[in-house]
Each structure stands twice: as C-alpha cells, then as structure tokens.
Amino acid sequence: MTKIEITDFTDEQALRTYVMARDMPRATMAYGVYPNCVKALAEYDALMARFQTDLADFTEYHADVVKAVAPYIDQLQQAMGTIVAIMQAIEAAAPGTFGIELPQEGK
C-alpha cells in the first residue's frame, strides 16, 4: 500500500481534494439515488394498490397506456430494488458508509 504523508498545508489540501472526490459518488448514492429509489418503489406499489380501490376503473386504461414500456418498467423496478438491497447490505456490513437508515427486522 502506498504511504501518504501529510507534512504541510499543501499535503493536507491534496488529501482534502482526494477525500472530496472519493466521497462525491457515495454522497450521490446516499442522498439522491437511494432515497429516490426507495420513494419511487413505494409510490409505484401505492399506485398498483390503488388499482384495487379508488383507481379500479383505470386499470385497463393504465395497462394500455404503459403497454409499450411495461417491460422497461419491470426492469427499472428490479434494478431499483437491487440498488436498495445492495446499499443496505453495504451499510449493514460497514455501518456509516452511506449513513442510511436500515429497515428494522420484522417491519
């Protein structure tokens, strides 16, 4: 492993530049991708549930409207679920990596 020495302010600034660059993708995942995937999955589930209640009259219409993109919707659902699961697994294995709240057992 390469040894990094911080001996002056210039070295410290270089370290800060590195840390900021390193943390940018992680922050995007933690504060953008993850919460928006969780939200989108919940909103889609809520929409599907509403086709059993107050939006029941729109079930066939909706199926027809999204028919051309339905396979892609399924792929997005699966991909977002995978992202959420992976990020939760990383957070469980290394708490604080993303700083996301993990689901509680049994809930």
Image (cartoon, rainbow, N blue to C red):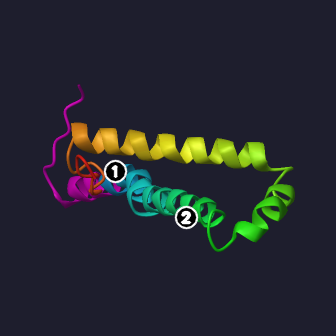
Query: Image point 50% across, 61% down: which residue?
Result: 42
Q: Position of residue 13 (x, y in %)?
A: 27, 59
Q: Position of residue 12 (x, y in %)?
A: 21, 56
Q: Find numbered disc 1 in the image and state the secondary structure of the residue it sits on.
A: helix
Nearer to me, 44 or 51: 51
* Three-letter amino acid code of the residue under disc 1: Tyr
Which residue is under mark 1? 18
Query: Image point 85% across, 61% down: which residue?
Result: 65
Residue 8 falls in which quadrant of the image? Answer: bottom left
Nearer to me, 94 or 6: 94
Q: Is residue 54 above or below residue 17?
A: below
Tell me: 54 left or right of 29. right
Residues shaded magenta: 1-18
Tell me: 44 left or right of 73. left
Q: Which of marks 2 and 1 is in front?
A: 2
* Three-letter amino acid code of the residue under disc 2: Ala
Which residue is under mark 2? 46
Asked whether 43 falls inside the magenta stretch, the response is no
Nearer to me, 79 or 52: 52
Q: Where is residue 63 in the image (x, y as percent from the top left)?
A: 80, 56
Q: Position of residue 9 (x, y in %)?
A: 19, 60
Toward the bottom, the furthest residue is 54
Asked whether 13 falls inside the magenta stretch, the response is yes
